[in-house]
Image: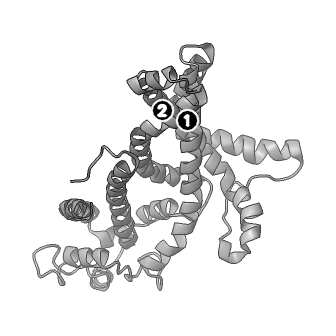
């Protein structure tokens, strides 16, 4: 298995370097200094900033340590994010990234876990009552849910959760903006009050959005598995319906479930861009949007590299999980 993982990792290194090159070239279609400083700036200021940011170096055709691209690749592979942000003088990219990881994980991990558990449970329930009115109602609800824009869910969620609900209950249940870091309070207070107050509503919105897509996919998987020979054999041996559904069928449907979760992770990060922006949560998605708006290219480059690396690592872990849940899969 280790030989397979190392080989896959080596195969993905050129892909990763190609992504870094495309990002750097895309950010330099227009002069980064002009994008950052704007109009009506003297040539002396532009040249001084270009030298300060290291943009007077060759882009590609130089020794690795001297070209802009070689320096960027070296920083990424050595995890050296000590380059100073353009928009936040005195703060390095690594410090800003470390400050944003916690709020992003506080949204993405609960949303991913809840969406997967609820969607798989609903799909099993729907496959159990396949063809009946309950199954049809769940399928129609899933189609309607996946047909509505993410932004619509955010707007209605903020209205009902942050404006209408306080009027009905008399106290503020969900916050529409802001975030309290665990270091600013105790862990018990964070999980009992601050996390539900600031993060529960966006997590619920993310779960509702993801349930429509995931339920349709998982139901199709469960319906297909329900017609397999091993299901017929298990029922012929007298296994109960619950055992057939939650032991035999669910176990054999783990590979499509793992695949779906792996595919969902990048879209979960993309979805957090909107949630973090509209709920003013200082996560990586919101910080990346601000960096794009302010032409803070060091942050854009570093965050994009991290997202690309995360996607590659998730694909590798997916292959490992395939082999763990299904003995028929061999990594070779």
Residue 314 x/y as whole percent? 37, 56
Q: Nearer the viewer, residue 22 or 291?
A: 22
Image quarter in which the C terminus is found: bottom left
Q: Are marks 2 and 1 in contact (CB under 8 Å)?
A: yes
> Dot 2 surroundings within 10 Å: few (below 14), some, or many (20 or more)?
many
Q: Where on the picture, by quarter, is residue 31?
A: bottom left
Residue 148 seen in render: no
Residue 136 x/y as whole percent? 57, 17
Using the numbered discs, state the Cα–Cα distance from disc 2 to disc 1 in whole angstroms: 6 Å
Q: Where on the picture, by quarter, is residue 242?
A: top right
| Position of 32 relative to 89 (above/below) | above
Q: Secondary structure at mark 1?
A: helix
Residue 313 left/right relative to 148: left
Residue at (44%, 81%) from the top-left corner? 92
Residue 62 seen in render: yes
> Dot 1 surroundings within 10 Å: few (below 14), some, or many (20 or more)?
few
Residue 249's disc is 2
Q: Secondary structure at mark 2?
A: helix
Looking at the image, which residue sits at the far top? 132
Residue picked out by circle 1 = 246
Residue 18 left/right relative to 46: left
Residue 312's disc is none
């Amino acid at each position: 298995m280790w030989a397979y993982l190392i080989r896959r990792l080596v195969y993905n290194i050129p892909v990763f370097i190609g992504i870094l090159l495309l990002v750097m070239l895309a950010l330099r279609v227009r002069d980064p200094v002009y994008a950052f400083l704007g109009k009506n700036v003297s040539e002396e200021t532009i040249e001084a900033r270009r030298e300060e940011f290291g943009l007077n170096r060759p882009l590609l055709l130089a020794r690795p340590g001297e070209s802009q691209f070689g320096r960027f690749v070296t920083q990424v592979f050595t995890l050296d994010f000590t380059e100073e942000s353009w928009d936040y003088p005195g703060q390095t990219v690594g410090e800003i990234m470390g400050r944003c990881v916690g709020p992003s994980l506080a949204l993405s991990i609960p949303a991913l876990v809840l969406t997967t558990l609820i969607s798989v449970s609903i799909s099993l329930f729907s496959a159990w009552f396949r063809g009946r009115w309950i199954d049809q109602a769940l399928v129609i609800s899933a189609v309607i849910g996946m047909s509505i824009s993410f932004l619509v869910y955010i707007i209605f969620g903020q209205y009902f959760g942050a404006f209408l609900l306080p009027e009905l209950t008399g106290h503020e249940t969900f916050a529409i903006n802001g975030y309290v870091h665990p270091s600013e309070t105790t862990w018990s207070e964070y999980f009992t009050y601050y996390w539900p107050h600031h993060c529960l509503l966006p997590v619920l919105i993310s779960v509702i959005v993801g349930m429509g897509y995931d339920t349709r996919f998982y139901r199709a998987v469960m319906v297909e598995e329900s017609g397999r020979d091993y299901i017929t054999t298990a029922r012929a041996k007298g296994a109960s319906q619950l055992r057939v559904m939650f032991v035999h069928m669910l176990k054999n449907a783990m590979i499509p479930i793992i695949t779906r979760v792996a595919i969902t992770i990048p879209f979960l990060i993309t979805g957090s861009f909107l949630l973090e922006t509209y709920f003013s949560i200082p996560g990586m998605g919101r910080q990346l949007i601000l960096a794009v708006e302010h032409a803070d290219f060091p942050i854009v480059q570093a965050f994009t590299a991290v997202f690309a690396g995360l996607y590659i690592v998730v694909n590798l872990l997916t292959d490992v999980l395939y082999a763990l849940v299904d003995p028929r899969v061999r990594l070779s």
